[in-house]
């Protein structure tokens, strides 16, 4: 329906018709495309208003942030009683780690970001120097948290607890399981029968057993190897079990990625004279890992949340601390507040991982850059 | 344009009574072929005739079961040392390009020279840029393969092989996956390469290319070399009936 006539080959690029793009176009297409859609939109807005109004009221405006007990809370206002958290926040974060030594945990936690930054962001300036720090960080963290060196008092593992325990278990499990998972995935694809069989057995065993069983093994086997009464390396044993368990899952995720690489890639690498390890390092893994990012992060998030299972072998993760708080007669019955708080902590950590994985996927996408 | 034939009589590839099976399927039968330094050979034949398998045996992407293949005086065996020597002397270009999608064009070209030949990065970059200029796409060096057209990707693949400074180049249907308008740019690149005196084995259906460039044309069918002749005789008076049939099928449309 064009009003003007153009010579063939000279038709200009016209802007799209009004109201099909931009904010107005989006609203029209998505929220008000038909009568029923418009009605649903209005209904949802009203519903959301009432929901959010009462929820926010309970969370913030009617909530009590400091009081001595639940009964006092109720006297002040009828919203959430966050006092159970604020009064015990130290326990939620550090477990029973001695108060005078808690700076060690803080320092370890904040320096962790410097250790991870160069690994997570490849374009970071001065990355090489930070990588050195990443390399020594595990020792640094162990010395600080565990103590026993340089005049730092040694802290028993049985005092560890709360979010600190979650982060220690989760981060160590994640960091150790990725390289082991990669090796297992390569092993499973190996041409060497022995390597392949061992990898398959390990992966299938670890995937075929419930994590709780492994944790019980970790805690009870200790009794056979250690003198009675010691609680020496329960944490290390639990970390090993977490690592093996998620390494098996990661191996399978990465195997999927490896198998998605076209055969032509290996042929090209072979034809250029690259050997197995060169091909693995430069061709196979970069592509396989990129494909597997969503699956790997999925496994990591699962592992991170599974750390709460340690409560069954008597370690005080945030849920354990929460239960202890609820057992206190002063705070009896505040389970909603307690569990919401723990949930919020897990949500923030896991959401951050999820966002990072999206960002990384985008960055590594070389198709439509 | 006729390219001057500067072949010498020294054979760089010698295949003697070579057989290959895929499982129980006899895919190559009693292949004997000598290729001299600087010689350009075009291999054609219907699909499934074993022509790709034949050139893939030459850099041992496929393993032959009987007979001998000698490349540059090195016999192809299971020995890894021999394999390395041969693969750095023999370049290969594939139908589906097989560029590494996660590396830039430049990195595609420098990866093998740096890690296989131990070239310093700076020299490898210079060499790669020189060869990318030769295939006429130096301006694409920092892009990723996925951003290039098929013809450009195939030219990068040629440059990538040339970066290893091979003595022999194998081409496995290099233009079969390309849109018609891009076939010419790749063929032109190959013709220029032929002019430098490179020993080339080309599996292709581009008979124009064969007529212009080849020193000899081989026709294969059902795993056998049916006929080998210089292009003039091959196209004007083929001897074998199957060759005649094949030529009539691909030339008359």
Image: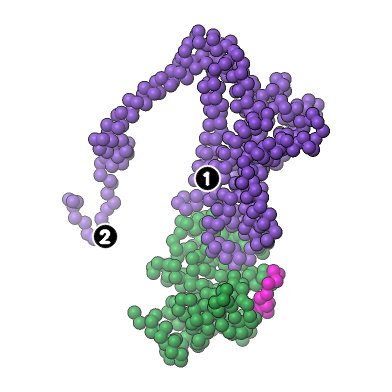
In magenta, the rendered stretch is B69-81
Label pair 1/2, CB-CB below 8 angstroms = no
Q: Which chain is purple?
A: A
Using a 10 Å C-alpha cutoff, classify the residue at mark 2 as few (fewer than 14 neighbours), some (14 to 19) or many (20 or more): few
Q: Nearer the viewer, residue A231 or B158?
A: A231
**Where in the figure is residue B61, as x and y percent of width and height?**
59, 70
**Where in the figure is residue A296, as x and y percent of width and height?**
57, 45
Using a 10 Å C-alpha cutoff, classify the residue at mark 1 as few (fewer than 14 neighbours), some (14 to 19) or many (20 or more): some
Seen in the picture, residue B251 relative to A44 is either above or below; the reply is below
Q: Nearer the viewer, residue A229 or B11?
A: A229
Tag 1 secondary structure: helix
In the image, which is nearer the foreground, mark 1 or mark 2?
1
Q: CA distance from mark 1 to mark 2?
A: 46 Å
Residue closest to the far right: A227
Q: Residue at x 50, y 55 (%)?
A: B143
Q: Which chain is green?
A: B
Residue A109 painted magenta: no
* Residue picked out by circle 1: A294
* Residue picked out by circle 2: A9
Quadrant of residue B150 within the rendered picture: bottom left
């Amino acid at each position: 329906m064009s009003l003007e006539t153009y010579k063939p080959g000279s038709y200009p690029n016209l802007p799209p018709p009004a109201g099909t793009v931009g904010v107005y176009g989006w609203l029209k297409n998505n929220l008000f495309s038909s009568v029923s859609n418009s009605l649903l939109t209005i209904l949802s807005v009203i519903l959301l208003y009432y929901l959010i109004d009462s929820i926010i009221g309970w969370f913030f405006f009617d909530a009590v942030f400091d009081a001595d007990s639940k009964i006092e809370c109720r006297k002040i206002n009828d919203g959430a009683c966050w006092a159970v958290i604020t009064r015990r926040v130290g326990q939620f974060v550090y477990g029973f780690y001695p108060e005078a030594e808690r700076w060690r945990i803080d320092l370890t936690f904040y320096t962790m970001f410097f250790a991870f930054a160069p690994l997570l962001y490849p374009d970071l300036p001065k990355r090489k120097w930070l990588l050195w720090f990443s390399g020594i960080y595990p020792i640094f963290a162990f010395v600080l948290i565990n103590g026993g060196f340089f005049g730092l008092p040694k802290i028993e593992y049985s005092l560890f607890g709360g979010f600190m325990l979650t982060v220690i278990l989760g981060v160590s499990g994640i960091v150790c399981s990725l390289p082991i998972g990669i090796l297992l995935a390569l092993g499973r694809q190996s041409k060497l029968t022995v390597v392949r069989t061992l990898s398959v057995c390990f992966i299938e065993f670890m995937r075929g057993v419930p994590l709780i069983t492994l944790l019980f093994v970790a805690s009870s086997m200790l009794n056979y190897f250690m003198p009675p009464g010691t609680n020496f390396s329960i944490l290390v044993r639990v970390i090993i079990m977490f690592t093996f368990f998620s390494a098996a899952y990661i191996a399978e995720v990465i195997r999927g990625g490896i198998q998605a690489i076209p055969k032509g890639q290996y042929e090209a690498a072979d034809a250029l004279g690259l050997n197995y390890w060169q091909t693995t390092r430069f061709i196979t893994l970069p592509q396989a890992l990129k494909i597997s990012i969503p699956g790997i992060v999925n496994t990591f998030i699962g592992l991170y949340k599974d750390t709460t299972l340690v409560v069954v072998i008597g370690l005080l993760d945030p849920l354990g601390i929460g239960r202890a708080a609820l057992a206190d007669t002063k705070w009896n019955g505040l389970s909603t507040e307690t569990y919401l708080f723990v949930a919020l902590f897990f949500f923030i950590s896991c959401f951050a991982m999820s966002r990072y994985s999206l960002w990384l996927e985008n960055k590594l996408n070389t198709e439509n850059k | 344009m006729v390219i001057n034939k500067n072949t010498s009589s020294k054979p760089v590839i010698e295949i003697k009574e070579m057989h290959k099976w895929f499982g129980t399927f006899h895919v190559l039968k009693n292949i004997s072929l000598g290729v001299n330094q600087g010689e350009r050979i075009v291999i054609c034949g219907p699909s499934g005739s074993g022509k790709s398998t034949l050139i893939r045996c030459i850099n041992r992407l496929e393993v032959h079961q009987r007979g001998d293949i000698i490349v540059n005086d090195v016999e192809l065996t299971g020995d890894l040392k021999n394999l390395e020597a041969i693969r750095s002397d023999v370049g290969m270009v594939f139908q589906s390009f097989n560029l590494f999608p996660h590396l830039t064009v430049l990195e595609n070209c420098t990866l093998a020279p740096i890690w296989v030949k131990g070239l310093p990065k700076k020299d490898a970059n210079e060499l790669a840029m020189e060869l990318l200029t030769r295939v006429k796409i130096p301006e694409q060096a920092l892009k990723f393969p996925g951003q290039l057209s098929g013809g450009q990707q195939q030219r990068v693949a040629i440059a990538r092989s040339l970066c290893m400074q091979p003595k022999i180049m194998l081409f496995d249907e290099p233009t079969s996956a390309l849109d018609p308008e891009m076939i010419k740019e790749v063929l032109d690149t190959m013709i220029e390469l032929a002019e430098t005196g490179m020993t080339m084995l080309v599996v292709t259906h581009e008979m124009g290319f064969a007529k212009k460039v080849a020193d000899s044309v081989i026709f294969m069918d059902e795993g056998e070399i049916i006929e080998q002749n210089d292009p003039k005789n091959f196209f004007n008076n083929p001897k074998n009936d199957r060759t005649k049939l094949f030529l009539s099928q691909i030339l008359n449309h």
